[in-house]
Image: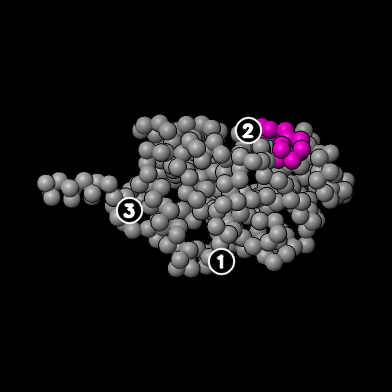
């Protein structure tokens, strides 16, 4: 009897100390743009109990909805994905409640055609922003936030959005602070520019998601991220990662007019995540 009880208790314990294989899907198949997010995943696994392996699975042609369908499928090529928050994703899957970029993804700069910078510099508040069409991806979870704030969106696949911006199918292409400069620095985009002087801001970030059938993967990641924060390793990594350092240096957020966006009621769980996990500067703290 005692032996059976001990076995039952062992089966109920999270398999943190085992060896799990993580197969993370990579949207657009773009490891350069997502270098920081992948580095946080490696940091989490390094600080979790057990010896775990990681494989990056490029998904260059998949939409986000297709990726999430894969997570729910048996024998899928992936068992982990990171993506922007949405209430539907939080309900459907297990979300690891530690924001990967400390909320930098919620600081949005705008890419524009370089020839239109002066014209579009009229944007200084929400009213002037509403006059212009903004390019955004199909199924991107922050589309709801932008739309609730009265902003006009033109949606398409990620790869198409670059051509559409050049063809002026919309005026502005919103990108996170930590991704915009990596994307812009590619040679074929020399005719584009970051709109100076302005940014929009709202509580938002990437989170890790796994199937509700894979609680052990969720627990490994959550434990690893918490351990990394507790030891100081997460903050040291955040401050030293080249993509984050360069993004903050080039974005000069404190020199920009910040346009705060309101969260829809269904997104309010973001505000319940502990403040220690969000990026702050004295002049920006009121926006969190």
Tell me where residue 28 sits by quadrant. Answer: top right
Distance from disc 1 to disc 2, alpha carbons, whole Å, reads 33 Å
Q: How is the image coloured?
A: one colour
Q: Quadrant of the C terminus?
A: bottom right
Please, what secondary structure does the residue beneath circle 2 have? loop
Q: Earlier in the sequence, mark 1 or mark 2?
A: 2
Distance from disc 1 to disc 3, alpha carbons, whole Å, reads 28 Å
Q: Earlier in the sequence, mark 1 or mark 3?
A: 3
Q: Which residue is mark 3?
A: 16
- Residue 83 position within the rendered picture, expressed as x and y whole percent measured from the top left: 54, 43
Q: Which residue is mark 2?
A: 138
Is label 3 or label 2 in front? 3
Relative to residue 152, is residue 32 drawn left or right? left
Q: Are marks 1 and 2 in contact (CB under 8 Å)?
A: no
Tell me where residue 152 sits by quadrant. Answer: top right
Residue at 48%, 63% in the rendered image = 229
Distance from disc 3 to disc 2, alpha carbons, whole Å, reads 36 Å
User: Dot 2: few (<14), some (14–19), or many (≥20) neighbours within 10 Å?
Assistant: some
Q: Is residue 159 magenta?
A: yes
Residue at 45%, 58% in the rendered image = 225
The answer to whether 237 is drawn above or below residue 11 in the figure is below
Q: Earlier in the sequence, mark 3 or mark 2?
A: 3
Q: Which residue is mark 1?
A: 240
**Residue segment shown in magenta:** 146-163
The answer to whether 138 is drawn above or below residue 172 in the figure is above
The answer to whether 207 is drawn above or below residue 225 in the figure is above
Q: Are marks 3 and 2 in contact (CB under 8 Å)?
A: no
How many numbered marks have been drawn onto this rendered protein structure? 3
Please, what secondary structure does the residue beneath circle 3 have? loop
Examine the rendering and report whether any part of residue 178 can be seen: no
Tell me where residue 227 sits by quadrant. Answer: bottom left
Please, what secondary structure does the residue beneath circle 1 have? helix
């Amino acid at each position: 009897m005692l032996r059976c009880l001990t076995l039952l208790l062992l089966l109920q314990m999270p398999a943190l100390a085992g060896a799990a294989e993580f197969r993370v899907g990579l949207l657009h198949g773009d490891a350069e743009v997502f270098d920081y997010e992948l580095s946080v995943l490696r940091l989490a696994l390094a600080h979790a109990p057990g010896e775990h392996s990681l494989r990056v699975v490029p998904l260059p042609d998949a939409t986000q909805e297709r990726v999430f369908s894969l997570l729910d499928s048996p024998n899928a090529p992936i068992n982990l994905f990171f993506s922007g928050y949405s209430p539907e994703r939080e309900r459907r899957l297990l979300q690891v409640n530690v924001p990967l970029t400390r909320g930098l993804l919620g600081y949005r700069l705008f890419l524009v055609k370089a020839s239109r910078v002066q014209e579009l510099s009229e944007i200084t508040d929400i009213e002037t922003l509403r006059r212009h069409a903004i390019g955004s991806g199909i199924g991107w979870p922050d589309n709801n936030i932008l739309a609730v704030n009265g902003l006009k969106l033109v949606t398409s696949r990620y790869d198409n959005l670059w051509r559409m911006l050049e063809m002026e199918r919309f005026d502005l292409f919103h990108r996170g602070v930590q991704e915009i400069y990596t994307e812009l620095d590619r040679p074929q985009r020399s005719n584009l520019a970051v709109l100076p002087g302005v940014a929009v801001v709202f509580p938002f970030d990437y989170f890790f998601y796994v199937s509700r059938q894979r609680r052990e993967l969720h627990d490994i990641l959550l434990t690893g991220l918490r351990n990394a924060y507790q030891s100081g390793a997460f903050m040291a990594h955040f401050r030293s990662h080249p993509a984050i350092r360069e993004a903050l240096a080039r974005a000069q957020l404190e020199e920009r007019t910040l346009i705060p966006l309101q969260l829809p009621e269904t997104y309010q769980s973001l505000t319940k995540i502990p403040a220690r996990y969000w990026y702050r500067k004295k002049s920006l703290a009121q926006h969190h």
